[in-house]
Image (cartoon, coloured by chain):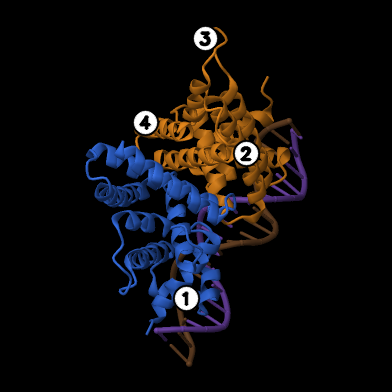
Chain colours: A orange, B blue, C brown, D purple
Amino acid sequence: MASRKTSIMEAAARVIARRGVRGLRVEELAAEAGVSTALIYYHFKDRTGILRQTLEFINDRAERYTTERDPDAPPPTAREELEQTLLLELQDTVEVRENSTAWGELRASAVFDETLREDLARATRIWVQEVAELLGVVQPMSSAVALAGAAERLTALLEGLSVRWLSGSLPLAHARTLLTEAIDTEVARLGS
Amino acid sequence: MASRKTSIMEAAARVIARRGVRGLRVEELAAEAGVSTALIYYHFKDRTGILRQTLEFINDRAERYTTERDPDAPPPTAREELEQTLLLELQDTVEVRENSTAWGELRASAVFDETLREDLARATRIWVQEVAELLGVVQPMSSAVALAGAAERLTALLEGLSVRWLSGSLPLAHARTLLTEAIDTEVARLGS
DNA sequence: GTCTATAACGGGATAGAC
DNA sequence: GTCTATCCCGTTATAGAC
């Protein structure tokens, strides 16, 4: 049973996807959640508290959708797993949109907010490491440096494609194609 | 002689680089420019006017630094020109920082602001086209589609690397290395 | 826990003198 | 053209009833 607090965070995720972190108005959030602003301040200390806890909430959800998989399907090959992991972030579903939007906002905000940088850098490092490991399974003979480089390029490219998609400069299908081709290229590069 | 208005826009560029488009406070801009807020409203109709004209001003400057070149140096090869064009955006100079920051802000804002999207998409298209043409000189046998794809990947990657740099997740030198390697890879891909 | 009503404040914008 | 002083509104945050 989703608690009141949880449903407020769900509403906050929707508002953030619509207005951005910096565009979130407590009053709009209250309307979206169907509660009063006072209740929001009761559950979250202040505006910053709303943001902090909601971003954490969104991050937890992201881990879920990133790892969930149909239990009856044949186990994916390493290459398939790599593609799926990366392409998952380029999907037009509510959750992915909310998550990518929030991530992009976090990234953009960190340019001007020192306090966000460490968290963001750490999360980025973990993500890059994850992709590097998948690449290592696909191309086991590659050096650690080469794997790290490929992973950094692929994840940075994904971030770039993602904002272009969300900002209306690139159709989703095309973004997916471009990313798939980049994966091909990087895998080939590691193999040569 | 830089007019008062111009020096306000220069100050605005600095404030934007420090606080972002959405973080610009007219009062802070006034302090930075050493004038009163009223004078700012005298020269620029309103906050939006400040932003519009300053972004235009920044854009004009960008074209200058993108195309300026030492007249005594030997003419660059097509490959060099390609690398220089892209790597120019990854430099720790005041102007590039201001410009990349502003571009990133524009990109991030467009996710939530319909009115920015068209301009941004057009600017992106022009930039991609430019890079595609340079790639075409390096690899003349490539199809238009392949060139466009490579250009889209390289410019999207550059945007991704740029925010990572500005948000403190990636040292500048490393970003440059990653981009150079990506250029290598894309050029090789076109040649194969 | 949840609401209504309102205080408090930050920041955009303007009036009017010089 | 430029300043000082100030208005005014949107938004965050809280007081107090239920």
Residue type beneath disc 2: Leu
Are discs 2 and 4 both within one chain? yes
Please report the residue visible at 66 percent of the width from the left and 47 percent of the height from the top.
A48
The residue pinned by badge 1 equals B38
From the viewer's side, name the closer residue of B35 and B10. B10
Asked whether the residues under marks 2 and 3 belong to the same chain, the reply is yes
Three-letter amino acid code at the position of disc 3: Ala
Report if the CB atoms under discs 1 and 4 are less than 8 Å apart. Answer: no
Disc 4 element: helix
Q: Position of residue B67 (x, y in %)?
A: 32, 65
A155 lies left or right of B142: right
Q: Amino acid at mark 1?
A: Ala
Tell me the element at label 3: loop
Question: From what the image shows, is residue A26 above or below residue B11?
Answer: above
- Label 1 vs label 3, nearer the camera: 3
Label 4 vs 3, first from the N-terminus: 3
| Residue B170: image location, x then y, percent | 57, 50
Q: Earlier in the sequence, mark 2 or mark 4?
A: 2
Mark 1–mark 3 Cα distance, whole angstroms, equals 67 Å
Label 3 sits on residue: A73
Q: Residues within 10 Å of mark 2 (few under 14, many from 20)?
A: many
Q: Say which amino acid is labelled 4.
A: Thr
SS at circle 1 = helix
Residue A177's disc is 4
Chain letter of the residue carrying label 2: A
